[in-house]
Image (cartoon, rainbow, N blue to C red):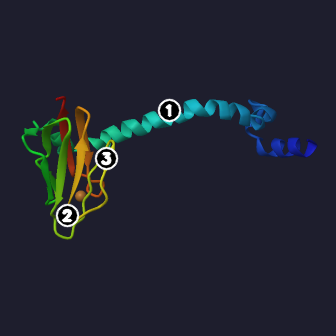
Amino acid sequence: MVAWYRAAGTGCGVLRARLPCATVRFRPVSIRIGGLPAVLVLSAALALAGAGCGSSPSQDKAATTPPVSGVHDVEARSLRFSPPAIQVPAGTTVSWHFDDGAVPHNVTGKGFASPNLKQTTWSHRFVAAGAFTYRCTLHANMVGRVVVTAQ
Ligand SMILES: [Cu+2]
């Protein structure tokens, strides 16, 4: 204990005038309790940063383009999904055709994710109604949307 106070005394020389070193050194419990708000603040900051980075023109386009009805096939070609947005009734199986030469792509959305693929087809059945945006995680601007309507 004596040794500790000595170390604290030398380590907190500047702060000592305002803050007792004992208080500073015995803060781990307080920091741990205060850690939650700190983490939340950090998350909020990251969310804001993500929102700022996340609204590229193509993503906005995928989110706002009127969806094409009567189509359940999407091409992944030339670094884009075509059509970028489709509308299907619930229960539809949507197929993505990967046709971009040697360039692999994937389809990654909330609740579905393909592996990285090229020259093949991957399908996912949409059971629940809703708007499902998806992306190719390999190419930042490859974004699409499937609007699933209730039957
Ligand atoms: Cu891609």
Q: Which residue is mark 2?
A: 120
In this rendering, the answer to whether 14 lies above or below 37 is below
Up the image or down, 84 lies above or below 76; here it is above
Spatial distance from mark 2 to mark 1, Cα to Cα? 43 Å
Image point (70%, 31%), residue name: 30
Assign the N terminus to one quadrant of the image. top right
Q: Amino acid at mark 2?
A: Thr
Q: Is residue 27 left or right of residue 104?
A: right
Q: Earlier in the sequence, mark 2 or mark 1?
A: 1
Q: Circle 3 sits on which residue?
A: 112
Residue assigned mark 1: 41
Sequence-wise first label, 3 or 1: 1
Instruction: Point out the frontmost of discs 3 and 1.
Output: 3
Amino acid at pointer 1: Val
Marks 3 and 2, the one that precedes in the sequence: 3
Residue 120 percent coordinates (x, y): 20, 63
Q: Taking 4 as reference, is 27 above or below it?
A: above
Mark nearest the camera among 2 and 1 is: 2
Toward the viewer: 35 or 15?
Answer: 35
Q: Say few, some or many: other residues with alpha carbon within 10 Å of mark 1 (under 14 / 14 to 19 / 20 or more).
A: few
Identify the residue shown where x is 24% and y is 44%.
125
The C terminus, quarter of image: top left
Residue 36, image quadrant: top right
Residue at 29% from the left image edge and 61% from the top image edge = 116
The span from disc 3 to disc 2 (Cα, nearest Å) is: 17 Å
Quarter of the rendered image showing ligand 1: bottom left
Q: Residues within 10 Å of mark 3 (few under 14, many from 20)?
A: few
